[in-house]
Amino acid sequence: MSLNIRTYHELTEADRSGLVDQIMTQRRRVADRLTTVRRVLAVMSGKGGVGKSFVTAGLARALARSGQATGVLDADFNGPTAPQMLRLPVTSRTLHDGAIEPAVSAEGVRCFSMGMLLEDGRPLAFRGPETEGHVWRETLEAAALREFLADVAWGALDQLLIDLPPGVQRFQELTELLAAPPAVLAVTIPTPESRDAVRRALRAAVERKATLLGVVENMVGGPFAGSAADELAAEFGTPVLARVPFHPGDDVWENVASKLGSSP
Amino acid sequence: MKFLCVECDRQMQFEERQLPGDGTLAAAFRCPTCGRVVALLTNPMETQLVASLGVKIGGTTIPPQPMETVRGMVTTGKPDAFDDAGEGRGPSWSPDAQERLARVPNFVRGMVKRIYLDYAKDRGIAEITPTVMDTARTELGLEGM
């Protein structure tokens, strides 16, 4: 005998669990927190080791010096470097009005990073069963991203820079959490290998309808040869915002900051 | 996740949640027509997956704490990462409850304390005891806290 079983959506009685409502409440907390943030800007590359965090920090400090209220969310939970890059003071995080205060750099950049929470020298580890960790670990990291967005007292910001880890997974999680896709700043080094990895990331960004603000080519003038930034800029119709040499001066970041500050 | 009493063709209603041990989460559902109760049992990995989403089967009666998932799940956090000073006002703590709270890692202790305080305040409980903590754990879905 075949049972006549209805679909999930046909069962419409009130449910005390309300799991979907709980998820929607989480999303509303993110949206509410970010109502005072003018622009969320994802710094991404798809490639590791190209200097995303370095570019994020240099740009954030320059934006703050130019008078823009700037925040940095370090979304690289397994390799957080923002506290060192921004030279943040090492203090405990305090709670006020249901939110956690970010650390603030000397220039006024507001930052939150897993690096501020983890014991020195220890990897990010989660409580949980020892087997099948791959099933839930990514979900937990997505939850951490949601909480970093929703539970930090970001306040009124002109720019909230999200320093993404390599790959596109965290970018996809970010777009699912935000009401609108973030703006994207791509970071590459000159090489064809970097170009190919960044191309994949930018395709993912375009598919998610993100606005591309431009490409920053890092580590220019050293051993890395190629024209990745120019090729990516031509392919995606976006400007090359800067070519950053090894040991760049403040003027390099201020130039990028002025271009970003004036872009819509 | 919903449960259908096939015989009555009625959506079953959440009844209660329990943590019987072994990483198992048990959620009981009752048919409002025939009264039949079934229990959903999750294995440790499934329990973890639900916790990872930051949702509670059966819902919750107190608001979420800031960074509840991060503080509840990260095991390599700095003991002094959060300054929860001034968050301890409200119902009193029995000596046994204080001792038990002291065993919670520093990284999450302030948040756990606040959750129990909110729970007790919400229900007009004047003193938090280990029994109150156990009940809160089960009712609020604080697996592992």
Image (cartoon, rainbow, N blue to C red):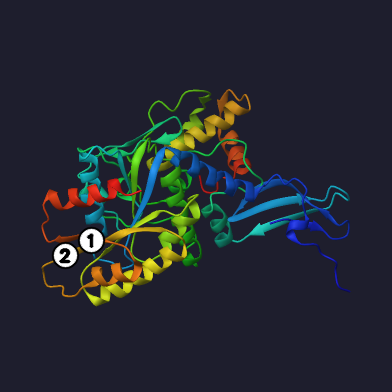
- Kindly identify the amino acid type of the residue bearing the numbered disc 1: Gly
Q: Disc 2 on helix, strand or loop?
A: strand
Residue A180: percent from left, percent from top? 48, 51
Disc number for residue A51:
1
- Kindly identify the amino acid type of the residue bearing the numbered disc 2: Met
Q: How far apart are marks 1 and 2 (CA)?
A: 8 Å
Q: Which residue is drawn at 20% across and 40% down?
A: A65
- The answer as to whether the residues below labels 1 and 2 share one chain is yes
Q: Which of marks 1 and 2 is in front?
A: 2
Q: Which residue is drawn at 85% across and 68% down?
A: A3
In contact (CB < 8 Å): disc 1 and disc 2 = yes
Can you identify the residue that label 2 sits on? A219
Residue B2 placement: quadrant: bottom right
The quarter of the picture where the N terminus of chain A appears is bottom right
Q: Which residue is drawn at 53% across and 39% down?
A: B64
Residue A20: percent from left, percent from top? 63, 50
Question: Quick one: which residue is furthest to the bottom in this view?
Answer: A192
